[in-house]
């Protein structure tokens, strides 16, 4: 239990960015400014996001938590450039998001739907490299590397559907890291795997984001998961979606499933966020 | 549009079962054929009926006419019509299906007419096709292609419309252009349904191959059968019918083999799904 008290100096450039601080050095990887998203026409319109403003600094691990129906998936789709805000601005590295930029990777919740079942594991991972015109020899090397990073060095020739759920989600993570994005977006990625696998995958993602130096925005409804993973947790409330609070998580790194979660500070963050999400 | 209930008459399940057929299962199928063959052989052996000649003489005619004799030309001509017509139907069906899928306004505008043409029994178009294209090669190929295009076209449209949004989102995230995602994602994802359409198209193409040769033709298997029947050559007629049955069987067999190769991932994934709790 002692381990988590020794605060390691953080290697990452972590910036407490305010809305006005957008100079070149401290430019956030992604920023949302007064983003509002309304679905449907004037008659039957539904407000998915009311007014969302936050930024994520380079190297940061940000979690977005909120109850179901709070527009988390809409938020992630907006961050990815898959959906356009009705009003407000979504910027990736200072440029408004009109489509998905090459520097963004996305891991969807449902690996069964996002992996392509007609391609082997290696070819799934290879696909974004192929699309980007990476030379063949380099591609093979990168696919092998990234599969090894997620602990799947030996399954390249298998098809995704031949693997367990946890392994399939590792393939999806490998595929989104293969082209070395600046920003990795994850939409409740571990919601469909069992608890044990979930812990393994949480530690995996903490390790690979160091290894690949990627900024992560991780959407989840699980507060324990958010606190365990994040540098900052953005709590959004249920309809209409607004940011209720942004909580800095200063728990020591590297984090540990047992030690970190036994830290009194962990319980404190957990309690505070639970209150926010449950609207008490 | 209303293609959904029309198009999927032959689901991919049939081929999945065929794929699973081990030699043991093949044997289960063969025995009945052997029994029927033997029964037919002995039942018809002493037949004096003009209409139901002995199987032995039919098979003799089959050999003398279709394998070594002059009817080989009819066979070649029919197969040529079938092949050209079917390939056109497949390519046009997938092409137009994909086009209608990508252009929503065109799809909405054409949908009632597509259905109208789809339900029209193609054989009634023979007179019109004759008027327009004469009685030669072109008429037959056009007729086969026109009749056979619909199952593939409607299944392509339907299959593409059913592609999971997450797969399309993923294609954008991975950096594909819209056209790239059609080839890399939409076509493979819709392939099981497209293939089911192609299989229906094949059946229709074989039917139209014969029908187009009945009415106005100077060659082909259909022409041979009708001529034999009109000339009281019932042995020849039966031999032609058997040849047609063999063509249908072989074509279907080749199709299933190709399908199992192309869609092995689909059947594999479905089998896994079935075993998961």
Image (cartoon, rainbow, N blue to C red):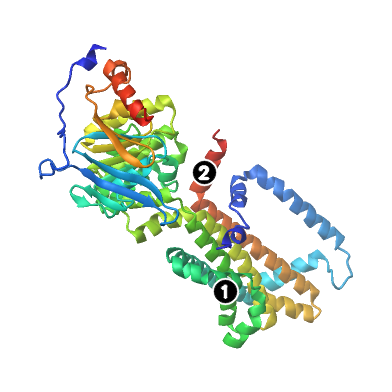
As drawn, is B177 to the left or to the right of B220? left
Q: Residues within 10 Å of mark 1 (few under 14, many from 20)?
A: many
The residue located at (78%, 57%) in the rendering is B37
The residue located at (77%, 68%) in the rendering is B58
Query: Is disc 2 on the same chain as disc 1?
Result: yes
Q: Earlier in the sequence, mark 1 or mark 2?
A: 1
The residue located at (33%, 22%) in the rendering is A271
Q: Position of residue A177 (x, y in %)?
A: 28, 41
Q: Is residue A102 visible?
A: no
Query: Which mark identifies residue B146?
Result: 1
Q: Position of residue B240 (x, y in %)?
A: 72, 71
Q: Which residue is mark 2?
A: B268
The residue located at (59%, 84%) in the rendering is B136
Indicate the secondary structure of the residue bearing disc 2: helix
Distance from Cα at disc 1 to Cα at disc 2 = 34 Å
Chain on which label 1 sits: B
Q: Which numbered mark, 1 or 2, is in the foreground of this view?
A: 1
The number of callouts visible is 2
**In the rendered image, the vertical position of residue A117 relative to residue B127, given as above or below:** above
Q: Is residue A211 visible?
A: yes
- Which quadrant of the figure has residue B179? bottom left
């Amino acid at each position: 239990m002692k381990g988590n008290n020794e605060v390691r100096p953080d290697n990452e450039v972590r910036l407490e960015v305010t809305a006005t601080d957008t100079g070149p050095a401290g430019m956030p990887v992604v920023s949302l400014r007064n983003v509002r998203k309304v679905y449907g026409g004037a008659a039957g319109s539904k407000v998915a996001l009311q007014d969302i403003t936050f930024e994520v600094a380079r190297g940061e691990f940000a979690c977005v938590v909120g109850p179901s129906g709070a527009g988390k998936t809409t938020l992630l789709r907006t961050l990815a450039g898959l959906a356009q805000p009705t009003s407000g601005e979504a910027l990736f590295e200072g440029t408004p998001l009109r489509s998905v930029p090459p520097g963004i990777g996305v891991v969807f919740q449902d690996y069964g739907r996002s992996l392509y079942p007609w391609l082997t594991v290696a070819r799934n991972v290879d696909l974004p490299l192929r699309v980007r015109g990476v030379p063949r020899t380099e591609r093979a090397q990168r696919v092998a590397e990234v599969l090894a990073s997620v602990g799947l060095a030996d399954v390249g020739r298998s098809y995704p559907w031949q693997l367990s759920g946890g392994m399939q989600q590792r393939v999806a993570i490998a595929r989104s890291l293969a082209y070395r994005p600046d920003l990795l977006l994850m939409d409740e990625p571990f919601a469909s795997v069992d608890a044990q696998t979930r812990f393994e995958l949480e530690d995996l993602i903490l390790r690979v984001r160091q290894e690949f130096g990627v900024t992560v925005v991780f959407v989840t409804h699980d507060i324990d998961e958010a606190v365990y993973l994040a540098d900052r947790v953005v709590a959004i409330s249920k309809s209409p979606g607004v940011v209720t609070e942004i909580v800095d998580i200063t728990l020591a790194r590297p984090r540990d499933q047992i030690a970190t979660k036994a830290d009194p500070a962990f319980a404190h963050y957990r309690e505070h966020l639970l209150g926010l999400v449950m609207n008490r | 549009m209303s293609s959904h209930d029309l198009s999927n008459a032959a689901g991919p399940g049939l081929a999945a079962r065929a794929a699973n057929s081990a030699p043991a299962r093949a044997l289960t199928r063969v025995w009945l054929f052997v029994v029927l063959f033997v029964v037919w052989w002995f039942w018809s052996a002493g037949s004096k009926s003009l209409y139901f000649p002995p199987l032995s003489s039919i098979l003799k005619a089959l050999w003398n006419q279709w394998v070594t004799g002059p009817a080989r030309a009819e066979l070649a001509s029919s197969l040529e019509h079938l092949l050209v017509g079917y390939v056109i139907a497949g390519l046009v069906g997938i092409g137009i299906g994909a086009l209608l899928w990508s252009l929503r306004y065109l799809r909405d505008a054409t949908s009632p007419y597509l259905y109208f043409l789809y339900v029209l029994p193609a054989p009634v178009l023979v007179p019109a096709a004759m008027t327009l294209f004469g009685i030669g090669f072109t008429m037959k190929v056009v007729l086969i292609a026109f009749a056979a295009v619909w199952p593939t076209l409607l299944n392509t449209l339907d299959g593409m419309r059913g592609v999971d949004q997450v797969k399309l989102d993923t294609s954008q995230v991975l950096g594909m252009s819209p056209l790239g995602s059609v080839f890399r994602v939409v076509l493979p994802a819709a392939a099981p349904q497209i293939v089911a359409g192609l299989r229906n198209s094949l059946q229709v193409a074989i039917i139209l191959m014969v029908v187009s040769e009945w009415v106005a033709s100077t060659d082909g298997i259909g022409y041979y059968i009708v001529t034999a029947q009109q000339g009281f050559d019932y042995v020849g007629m039966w031999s032609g019918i058997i040849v047609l049955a063999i063509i249908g069987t072989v074509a279907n067999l080749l199709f299933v083999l190709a399908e199992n190769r192309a869609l092995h991932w689909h059947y594999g994934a479905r089998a896994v799904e079935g075993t998961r709790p």
